[in-house]
Image: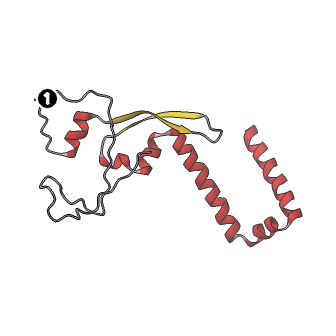
Amino acid sequence: MATKTVISKVLDAEAVDGIIEFPQNKTLYVDQFTDMAPVKPGDVFQPETMEDVFNFYKPEKKNVQMLDLEGKPVKENFKFNAIKDFDDKELIKQSPYLAQQKSAVDSYKTIEQQLIKNKILRRAYENEESRKHLIVALQALLAELEKN
């Protein structure tokens, strides 16, 4: 994922006029988001909205490499049609691999919440003998689900 860089303040009061203060509640993303060659000098693109910018440049990041749980590389492409597409949730929507990982994390969180809230399940988990029986039952359930 891209590194987030935040420029918070210009500390020198006599800073060059070309430097502006960047609001603390904003994030600045800097990366090459397209494989297109730079625009020729002299070509002037004058967008009026952010939508114009995205439609003109059609930013995308190809072959983003991630590692799966076994350490194998997973490559995916990301397209950006609006500022919101840089959000984690939007990136997950574009990526089958990230969506699968999010689903697994959500499942683990649900199980954790059940262990915290369900006293009977928690007692069964704390007792060594009960835990073994619980694991056997869950494995049998998993095998049954995988059959269907």
How many marks the image carries: the answer is 1
Give the side of residue 11 with respect to residue 62, left or right.
left
Q: How is the image coloured?
A: secondary structure
Above or below, comparing residue 85 to residue 16 in the picture? above
Q: Dot 1: what SS?
A: loop
Above or below, comparing residue 143 to residue 17 in the picture? above
Give the side of residue 21 with respect to residue 29, left or right.
left
Percent x, y for residue 140? 81, 48
Q: Nearer the viewer, residue 100 or 41?
A: 41
Percent x, y for residue 138? 78, 52
State the residue at coordinates (32%, 55%). Answer: 27
Percent x, y for residue 145? 73, 44
Q: Residues within 10 Å of mark 1 (few under 14, many from 20)?
A: few
Percent x, y for residue 28? 31, 52
State the residue at coordinates (16%, 27%). Answer: 40
Name, please, the residue furthest toward the right: 129
Quadrant of the rendering where the C terminus is positioned: top right
Q: Nearer the viewer, residue 97 or 71?
A: 71
Quadrant of the rendering where the N terminus is positioned: top left
Q: Amino acid at mark 1?
A: Pro
Q: Residue 94 sits in which quadrant?
A: top left
Above or below, comparing residue 144 to residue 122 in the picture? above
State the residue at coordinates (25%, 62%). Answer: 23
Residue to which mark 1 is pinned? 41
